[in-house]
Image: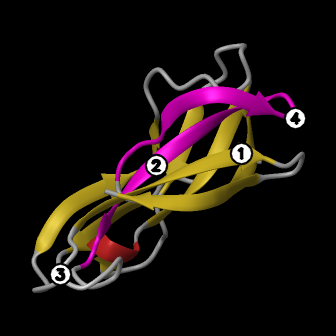
Amino acid sequence: MEIPYVRAEVRDLSGRIFRIVETHVVPGLDLDGYGSPVVLVPPDRKNLNLFNMHWRLFIQRGDCGHELGTVIGMDDPFPEPGEFRGLRNFSVAEPVQPGIAGEGFQGVSITVYSFDGRRYLGGRSDYR
């Protein structure tokens, strides 16, 4: 499968452009132990929201992209200890709106993703 190229605007709660995101290789993230590039693709739609951002996750082998799931969060994944079913675990940080994790709380949630044999699935989120 060809990995799609997408470029999109992410808006903050007041509707201002917070960041421009696009399809990109995640530097330094090796999920398979062979150095295959990990590529994130943002949603192909307008008015993406900072607090509801997700990416399609691909691993690229040669000219083919293999979609391995969806990750939620604004920033790139980073490696975590361990692997499951042959692919390394990773985590993603996501900004949290005030009041989501408790009264007056504002910060980030960290979610660890593991491979189930078909796709990556997120586990429980740790609020910080």
Task: Give coordinates of residue 5: x percent, y percent.
Answer: 50, 52
* Amino acid type of the residue that numbered disc 3 sits on in the rendered structure: Gly
Dot 4 crowding, Cα within 10 Å, few <14, some 14–19, many 20+: few
Q: Can residue 71 be seen in this view?
A: no
Q: Which of marks 1 and 2 is nearer the N terminus?
A: 2
Local packing at callout 3 (Cα closer than 10 Å; few below 14, some 14-19, many 20+) is: few
Say which residue label 1 marks: 114
Relative to 49, residue 29 above or below: above
Instruction: In this rendered view, identify the residue nearer to me: 52 or 98.
Output: 98
Task: From this view, report whether residue 106 is shown above or below residue 100.
Answer: above
Q: Are marks 1 and 2 in contact (CB under 8 Å)?
A: no
Of mark 4 and mark 1, the one earlier in the sequence is 4
Residue at disc 3, secondary structure:
loop
Q: Say above or below: 13 vs 24.
A: below
Residue at the image position 10 percent from the left and 78 percent from the top: 16
Q: Give the range drawn in magenta.
A: 75-97
Magenta segment: does it hold 77?
Answer: yes
Q: What element carries label 2?
A: strand
Badge 1 crowding class, 10 Å Cα cut-off, few under 14, some 14 to 19, many 20 or more, is many
- Tag shown at residue 105: none
Front one among 30 and 66: 30
Q: Name the amino acid, label 2.
A: Val
Instruction: Give the labeled residue for mark 3.
Output: 104
Residue marked by disc 4: 85
Q: Quadrant of the C terminus?
A: bottom left
Q: Mark 2 points at which residue?
A: 92
Cα separation between marks 4 and 3:
39 Å
